[in-house]
Amino acid sequence: GAPVRTGGRAVFTASTSRRDVSACAKRKVVTQDKAWEKGLGSVGIFLEDDEKKSFSLVGRLADRKVLSSVEQSGLLSAAEKAGLTLTKVENLKLLSTAEKLGVLALVEDAFAKDGATISSYSIPFLLGAIASLVLIPTDNAAVATVHWAATGVCLAGFTALFAGGFVIKSLQEDD
């Protein structure tokens, strides 16, 4: 409520409407420290840690029937008509190359992170796009090319991270 002055002091009345706010704190769990060794000054074998939810991307995609929806939409047939088949992907060794380059591990780590965190990684790219628009002049063709290329790369990074964070968050949410 509004403050009421009594004797030079402001006192807030209790006639305000009540507002319930609920928040979910991270649960703490006790886990075993696998790297623990007995020694002088060593702390216990158990440690307090944040609860980690197990998350299976393939299981979550199956639960949400994403792959069935992709099949029904005709995307797989269109890819096959365009010449992209699983045999061709296997012959080109795309998956093994992606695994060697660490792309699959990066995707797995991304799905282990919170989607909001990944979306927040997009902010520097947005600021970079704005900075390149404002700071890089377009006096001649070469500089204008750098201007638009830098802006495009930053906007592409922003879009990928921002949208990717929302996709990951929606896959991680419980129904």
Image (tube, helix red, strand yellow):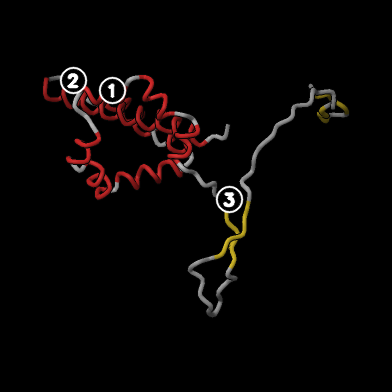
Q: Disc 2 marks which residue?
A: 138
Q: Nearer the viewer, residue 71 or 144?
A: 71
Question: Which comes sooner in the sequence, label 2 or label 3?
Answer: 3
Secondary structure beneath disc 1? helix
Q: Secondary structure at mark 3?
A: loop
The label number, if any, that marks residue 77 in the structure image: 1
Quadrant assignment for the C terminus: top right
For label 3, the residue is 51
**Of the residues tagged 2 and 3, which is closer to the observer?**
3
At mark 2, the secondary structure is loop
Q: Assess whether mark 3 and mark 2 are in contact (beta carbons under 8 angstroms).
A: no
Name the residue at 40% across, 42% down.
110
Tell me residue 92's x, y (percent): 17, 40
152 lies left or right of 53: left
Question: What residue is at 40 percent from the left and 32 percent from the top?
Answer: 164
From the viewer's perspective, is 139 left or right of 24?
A: left
- The answer to which quarter of the image holds residue 122 is top left
- CA gap between label 1 and label 2 equals 44 Å
The N terminus appears in which quarter of the rendering?
top right
Residue 74 is left or right of residue 92, and the answer is right
Residue 162 image offset from top left, x and y in percent: 40, 30
